Amino acid sequence: MNITHLIFSFKTGGAQTMLVDIVNVQVNFAKVSIIIINKSYNKTLIDKIDRRVKLFFINRDEGSKNPYSIIRINLLLLKLRSNVLHCHNHNIIPLLLPGFRKKTMLTLHCMGIPAKYLNKYSQLFAISESVKKDIKDRAKKDSTVIYNGIYTEGITAKENWLINSIFKIICVGRLSHLIKGQHLAIEALHILKKTGVNNIQLDLIGTGESESYLKELTTKYGLNEQVSFLGLKDRDYIYAHLKDYDLLVQPSLFEGFGLTVAEGMAAKISVLVSNVDGPMEIIDNGKYGYSFSSGNAEEIASKIISIMNTSPNDIRNKIELAYEHVKNNFDISLTAKNYIENY
């Protein structure tokens, strides 16, 4: 089998980091290439790709309509003669010759993707049942669910569930509060502080357009000693340090899946998620984690206190079940295998 993945940019987003893991598994069973269309990529992430995977850089300026880039892409595809063209952005297919469409597939990485080009792909993959339903409802298109995967073996697991004097919470994701909801976690700490609960540390990993707003909110609530902005961290750092925390909070207002939730479960720490479809699918509606009503900071605060007061044995029992659930359902080896079977 000859597989070519096409993607516009290769920064440190969830779709890109997961693609690295997928191709590193697929290259053991097939000939694999990646075409990065735009002049937008992270060298550190590129360096993590197996050397057997062929990389091609078109170096197109984002949004450019220069026909030279389109010609280069199609000439390259003719040369590669791949029998699977796997796209990771919905609007790549207009750049391809019509003759390629019968072997062109698309992974839908989130909800709300415009339906305009979806009927031009021969097959659609959805990263969760939530995304599948969204596409069916809006675009009347069927898709096959293949869950996003994580490299579970690369995540260091927590071994001691005794809570120290400081209860440590981690929140990982792009700092975009209208989507990811980090302001709700900060507001929850403010609520707890007003009741005299001060022994909580919240670390936020990520950068984004809401960084200034979230820092101002932290200052407004007098939480600068409790809330830390760690900036952008690579996956190696995150996988090594998740174990240092007692709880991962995912307060997203919109989320098609939630890789960080699965990563927290693989690190054997408790997870607390908003009750939106993607994260709830991962924790099986509360069987493997805790949840709160989306947008409700007071409920986040209440659930944090409840988790803090849960016995270490009960915490450990839930965490061990969650760990097995992630390994059996969301490991990257399963994701890569399922793609190959569906190709």
Image (cartoon, rainbow, N blue to C red):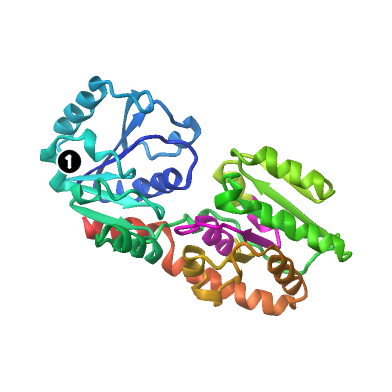
Q: Bin the neighbour count of mark 1 within 10 Å (Cα to Cα): few under 14, some 14-19, many 20 and up.
A: some
Spot occupied by residue 56 in the image (x, y as percentages of width and height): 30, 29
Residue drawn at (18%, 52%) of the image: 122
Spot occupied by residue 164 in the image (x, y as percentages of width and height): 81, 64
Q: Is residue 243 magenta?
A: yes
Position of 164 relative to 102 (above/below): below
Residue extending farthest right: 196
Spot occupied by residue 88 in the image (x, y as percentages of width and height): 33, 45
The residue indicated by pointer 1 is 82
In the picture, residue 64 is in which quadrant? top left
In the picture, residue 322 is in which quadrant? bottom right
Q: Let me know if residue 1 appears in the view.
A: no
Spot occupied by residue 216 in the image (x, y as percentages of width and height): 75, 41
On screen, residue 40 versus residue 85, left or right, reads right
Q: Let me know if residue 235 appears in the view.
A: yes
In the picture, residue 317 is in which quadrant? bottom right
On screen, residue 172 versus residue 324, left or right, reads right
The quadrant in which the C terminus is found is: bottom left
On screen, residue 281 versus residue 321, left or right, reads left
Position of 251 relative to 34 (above/below): below
Q: Give, as a three-letter code, the residue at label 1.
A: Ser
Magenta-tinted stretch? 241-266
Residue drawn at (44%, 63%) of the image: 330
